[in-house]
Image: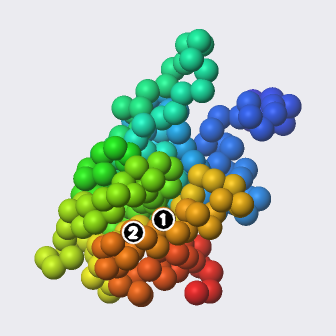
Amino acid sequence: MNGRKLAVNAEMTFLELPFYERISRLHELGYRGLGEISSMQKNCSDPAYFPVFELASKYKWILMFHTGIVGRGKFDEPSNVASGRMRPIYLEEIARQFPKLTILGAHLGNPEYEWAAEVTRWNPNVYFDLSGTTLPKMAGRLNEFRKIFWWSDVEWEAQPTDDPSPYSKLVFGTDTGTPNIEAVLDRYLAMFDACDVPERTRKMILGGTLAKMLGLPD
């Protein structure tokens, strides 16, 4: 019986394998994470996805989730996609169910920024980036990030490092191609200046935190 099962699996293409089996194969090839996870058929914290999260936790992978509004490309075709399935609040349940799993949320939950910030505040294994339209949209009011990441001067029990800045839960991210990365970096730097983000924290956001996650030299 096992031999027959193995034979059937051997004939299946990679994309035909169950998703958790694909995760195992990718781990064997040296992959370190999965993302950007988007357009899910259920809420992203649905127990149907737990086998995948369990494997990712076991392999110490980084899972990167799209959060917030999901773009729509084909307006005249039906699709089983809904932005509400990718709300940042759902990352909280994943983070608590799988405390050893490192979770990245893209786009800071656009437009649910405050929910995203509170989720990352109380879950040491959750981080967000500011990729997408968030920084362009808030270009004229970047100082409002002070209200979103408000807990600089209060006790922070879920702080994952010795950096007291709430902005330490951000990492650099971009949706653009290589030619446009400089413009995205300039937007991050403008936000840093508007919110007086400490120099040490800036360096961590711009690569230091991700380097630690991946076990790379600073």
SS at badge 1:
helix
Left or right? Give the position of 14 relative to 76: right
Closer to the camera, 84 or 56? 84
Residue 188 screen position, x and y as percent: 47, 68
Res. 50 image quadrant: top left
Closer to the camera, 161 or 109? 109
Question: Disc 1 marks which amino acid?
Answer: Arg
Res. 196 image quadrant: bottom left
Q: Residue at x 86, y 31 (%)?
A: 11
Answer whether labels 2 and 1 touch (C-beta < 8 Å): yes
Question: Disc 2 marks which amino acid?
Answer: Met
| Residue designated by label 1 | 187
| Residue designated by label 2 | 191
SS at badge 2:
helix
**Colour scheme of the picture:** rainbow
The extreme front residue here reads 140
Other-residue count near label 2 (Cα within 10 Å), few / some / many at <14 / 14–19 / ≥20: many
- Location of the N terminus by quadrant is top right
The extreme left residue here reads 154
Is residue 123 visible in the rendered structure shown here? no
Q: Is residue 161 above or below residue 47?
A: below
Q: Is residue 39 above or below residue 147?
A: above
Closer to the camera, 90 or 208? 208
Residue 134 screen position, x and y as percent: 42, 52
Left or right? Give the position of 194 relative to 171: left
Instruction: Report the Cα–Cα distance between label 2 and label 1.
Output: 6 Å
Left or right? Give the position of 175 relative to 42: right
- Location of the C terminus by quadrant is bottom right
Residue 141 screen position, x and y as percent: 30, 59
Residue 204 screen position, x and y as percent: 47, 80
Q: Residue at x 44, y 80 (%)?
A: 202
